[in-house]
Amino acid sequence: MNEIISLIKQKAAAYKDEVIALRRHLHQHPELSFNEYNTSEFICQKLTEYKVEFQKGIVKTGIVALIKGKNPDKKVIALRGDIDALPIQEENEVAYCSKNAGIMHACGHDVHTASLLGVIKILSELTDKFEGTIKCIFQPGEEKLPGGASLMIKEGVLKNPSPTAIFGQHVYPQLTAGKVGFRKGMYMASTDELYLTVIGKGGHAALPHLNIDPIMIAAQTLVALQQVVSRGANPITPSVLSFGKIQANGATNVIPDKVYIEGTFRTMDEEWRKAAHEKITAIAEQTAIAMGGKCEVEIRKGYPFLVNDEELTTKAQEAAELFLGKENVVDLDVRMTAEDFAYYSQEMPACFYRLGTAFNDKPNSGLHTPTFNIDEAAIETSIGLMSWLAINELAS
C-alpha cells in the first residue's frame, strides 16, 4: 500500500495546478440547480479527454463515469461530487470571479466537481493497481428540493453496477487547508421548509376593533411555536426550529390582510420529525383560530438526516491518517445543516467527510456568503485523499 500512496501523492502534486484551473473555470461559470447544462458539457469534455467511460443526461445534467480496474466485477464503490451553484452575487475581487450575474459557487461545489475530475484522472492512470470498479457521480441540484441525489437514485444511479459503499466530501472553511475531518454515526440533520400564511382582516390601524390583526396573530404564533422544541422534543434529540422571513405588507396606519412567514425545522429523529410537523401545524392553526383568524401551513419535507456508517468511516479515517498524518485528521461535531448526500446514506454504507479549505494568513468567509473562497492548496489534499480512499476501500 505504501507504493500506491506514493504514486497517488506524486500524481496529486503533478495535477494540482490543472485541477485548480478546472476549479477556476467552473467558479467563473456557475449555474443554478437543475440548470447546470454548460457545467455538464464541460465535465463530459474532460471525461472524453481522459478516455473514461461515462453516461450523461441523468436527471438531465447528471453524469456517471466508471473507472474499471482489474477484475472490475469484484467490488464496486462510488464517489460523489455535486455541481450546482447558489443565487448569490459574488463580491470576491479575484481574476476568476463569477461571470454569471447573481450566481456564485458559494458552497464549494466547483471544488467538489473539479476534485472529482482530478480523482478520475489519477485513478484512470492506476487501473493496473487495483481490482474492482469506481463509480463517479456528478450530481446536479444539491441546493434545491427535492435534491438531485433523490432524483438520481430514482433514475437508477446506484444500479448497473451497484456500489457497496459511497464517499462524498465537502469544503470546510473552519478547518485549515491540508486537514480533513470525519464524524462516525449521525452527522447532519434532516431539513424541512415551513411556509405559513396568517390570514386576518385588514383595515385602518386607528380602528383595530374593526379588524383582525394578522401581525399580532403572527407574533403570538411565533412565540407559541418555540414550545415545539423547548417542550416537545426530547432534550437529547438535536432539534432546531427557526424562522428567517416575516412579510406583512401594511403601513404605519394600515393593518394588512395577511402575513407570510418562512422558516426551517431540523432534527435527527424521523419519528420526532413527523410528530413535530403535526405540532407545528396544530399550534399555528389553533393560535390563529383563537384570535379570530386563520393560518395556512405548508411543510415541504426536505432531506433526511445523514448518517455516516461506523465501519466504513472508521476505515476511511484510519486511511486518511495514514495518507495525511494523524495531526491532519480531526473529529467533527454533529451539524444541524443538511445535505442531500443523506439520501445515499439511507441506501448504503456512506462516508461524508470535510475538506479543510481555510487560509492561514487571511480572514475566511463562511459558506453561502458572497465572499466565500478557498485556499487552493486544499486541492492537492482533495484529489490525493479521495483517490486513496477509493483504492483502499476496494482492497478491504
Image (cartoon, helix red, strand yellow):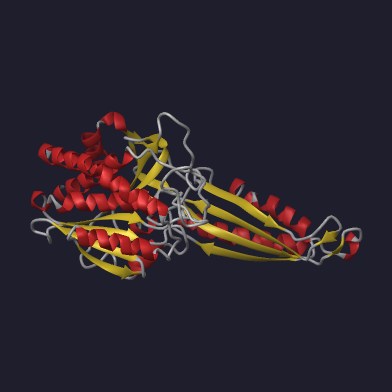
Which corner quadrant of the image does residue 80 belong to?
Answer: bottom left
Q: Is residue 173 above or below residue 86?
A: above
In the picture as drawn, the residue positioned furthest to the front comes out as 95
In the foreground, 300 or 278: 300
Which corner quadrant of the image does residue 344 belong to?
Answer: bottom left
Q: Which percent across, then down, holds residue 33?
A: 44, 62
Residue found at x 40% / y 46%:
187
Position of residue 215 in the picture relative to residue 178 (left or right): right
In the foreground, 49 or 74: 49
Residue found at x 30% / y 42%:
379
Please state the total of marks drawn on the protein image.
0
In the foreground, 305 or 232: 305
Which corner quadrant of the image does residue 324 belong to?
Answer: top left
Residue found at x 62% / y 51%:
244
Position of residue 291 in the picture relative to residue 239 (left or right): right
Residue found at x 38% / y 44%:
171
Q: Is residue 345 above or below residue 319?
A: below
Q: Which percent across, then down, holds residue 30?
A: 42, 56
Q: Is residue 233 visible?
A: no
Position of residue 197 in the picture relative to residue 384 (left or right): right
Q: Which percent across, then down, holds residue 308?
A: 34, 48
Q: Is residue 374 above or below residue 61?
A: above
Q: Is residue 128 visible?
A: yes
Q: Which percent across, then down, holds residue 362?
A: 45, 31
Q: Quadrant of the N terminus?
A: top left
